[in-house]
Amino acid sequence: MTDKSVMDIAGNIAMPGFTAPKVLWIKRNENENFNKIYKVLLPKDYLRFYLTGEFFSDLSDASGTYWLDVGKRDWSTKLLEASSMNISQMPNVCEGTDQTGIIKKDIADKYGFNMNARFTVAQEITQLLRRVRII
């Protein structure tokens, strides 16, 4: 792939802070850890997974991984393959306002959350966690 074709897909130039270059570093320097990757989640997406058991990311944050095809608004298999990754290792992507799960019963019981609480993909989960002193 040429630099231009990558930029046409990702809509950005590659920056060291994006997720793809970091994962490539792990592949080159800690291959044993790279081979253990099950899902790639951004911090807020991991918190959502902890609370709901669901794997989601919003399109805005996903564009900062350098694996998103911004035109198709979905993961790019070409960009993932260039990093030796595949689509099964990525969370579902959706709009920031989409509902992405409810709190798991064990989490609701443990922290006193309302079981009817719903999450949107871009919700500020850290504010919720600070209230119960998880973080």
Image (cartoon, rainbow, N blue to C red):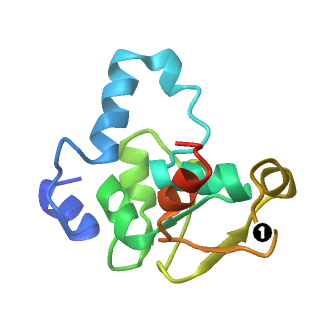
Residue 59 versus residue 97 in the image, above or below: above
Please state the horizontal and vertical placement of residue 61, each as a whole percent of the image.
37, 63
Looking at the rendering, which quadrant does residue 112 occupy? bottom right
| Disc 1 secondary structure class | loop
In-front residue for pair 100/30: 100
Please state the horizontal and vertical placement of residue 30, each as a whole percent of the image.
41, 16
In-front residue for pair 45/112: 112
On screen, residue 90 versus residue 10, left or right, reads right
Residue assigned mark 1: 114
In-front residue for pair 112/115: 112
Number of marks in picture: 1
Residue type pointed to by label 1: Asn
Instruction: Give the residue displayed 80% in from the left and 47% down from the top.
Output: 110
Residue 76 versus residue 134 in the image, above or below: below
On screen, residue 107 versus residue 85, left or right, reads right
- Regarding residue 12, the answer to whether it shows in the image is yes
On screen, residue 100 versus residue 18, left or right, reads right
Residue 133 versus residue 5 in the image, above or below: above
Looking at the rendering, which quadrant does residue 21 occupy? top left
Instruction: Give the residue displayed 63% in from the left and 58% down from the top.
Output: 55
Please state the horizontal and vertical placement of residue 10, each as a whole percent of the image.
27, 65
On screen, residue 25 versus residue 52, left or right, reads left
- Regarding residue 87, the answer to whether it shows in the image is no
Please state the horizontal and vertical placement of residue 22, each as a whole percent of the image.
31, 35
Instruction: Give the residue displayed 41% in from the left and 72% down from the top.
Output: 59
Q: Residues within 10 Å of mark 1 (few under 14, many from 20)?
A: few
Looking at the rendering, which quadrant does residue 76 occupy? bottom left
